Every structure is written in C-alpha cells, then in structure tokens.
Image (cartoon, rainbow, N blue to C red):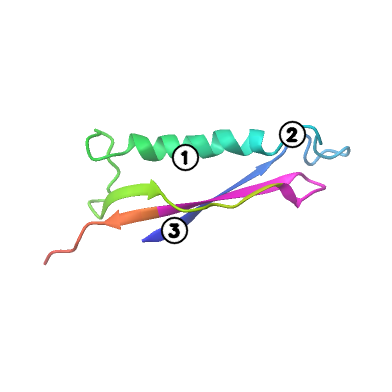
Amino acid sequence: MVRTIVIYATLPGGGMPEGPNPVYPGGKVFHPLIQSVENALSAVDATSQNTLTLGGLVSHVWLEGEGLMVTGELDETQGQGMQTLPVRILMWPRTS
C-alpha cells in the first residue's frame, strides 16, 4: 500500500503583522519534523519490542520515493508551508 504523510508548519513570525522572518529558511522548520518521522519509522522494526503491526495487519512501514517541500510559499503572508512524505506499507498476507 502507498500512502502520503503531509506535514504543515508555519515559519517563525507567520501570522504576525510583520509577517514571516525572511532570513529564516523554511528548511530549518521542516527538516527536524521530517527527521522525527524518519526516527519514528526506523524505531519500529521486526526486532523491536515496539513493533507497530496495526493488530497484525502490517509487516513493515518505510519512506520511499520523492516528497514535496513548499517552505512557506503556500501562504506567503502567513508563512504556511508543507512537506509530503511518501510511505510504503507492507501488509501481511491474509490466510483463511
């Protein structure tokens, strides 16, 4: 199964009358968020005590493919941006 995680974030100063800080790059906001998702997925594996199987339906989950980063241009006045992360989910085969 292929799904997409979408992360929305507001740049520093977004939503303020002066607007987002133009010298603060959007990547500085999004890269720690992406790293958090990567860490969460890598911590969950078949050898871990914390294996996430969704009740035995899922075998593995990993990021694969190209995402899209829009760093504050989604709404320039508010400094709203987004990042997409493509996710692959390997389901256990059903047995009757």
Q: What is the three-letter code of the residue carrying label 1? A: Val
Badge 2: residue crowd in 10 Å (few <14, some 14–19, many ≥20)? many
Q: Residue furthest front?
A: 66
Disc 1, disc 2: CB below 8 Å?
no
Residue count near mark 3 (Cα–Cα under 10 Å), binned few <14, some 14–19, many ≥20? few
What is the quadrant of residue 23 in the picture?
top right
Label 3 sits on residue: 3
Q: Could you tell which of marks 1 and 3 lies nearer the N-terminus? A: 3
Residue pointed to by mark 1: 37
| Secondary element at image label 2 | loop
The quadrant holding residue 43 is top left
Decide which of tag 3 and tag 2 comes sooner along the chain.
3
Question: Residue tagged by mark 2?
Answer: 12
- Residue 24 locus on image (x, y percent): 75, 32
Q: Which quadrant of the figure contains the C terminus? A: bottom left
Residue 12: % across, % down? 74, 34
In the image, the segment drawn in magenta is 72-87
Residue situated in front as seen by the camera: 57 or 84: 84
Pointer 3 and pointer 2: residues touching (CB < 8 Å)?
no
Tell me the residue at 88%/39% (across/down): 17
User: Marks 1 and 3, Cα distance to the nearest angstrom?
Assistant: 14 Å
Residue 9: x %, y % from top left = 65, 43
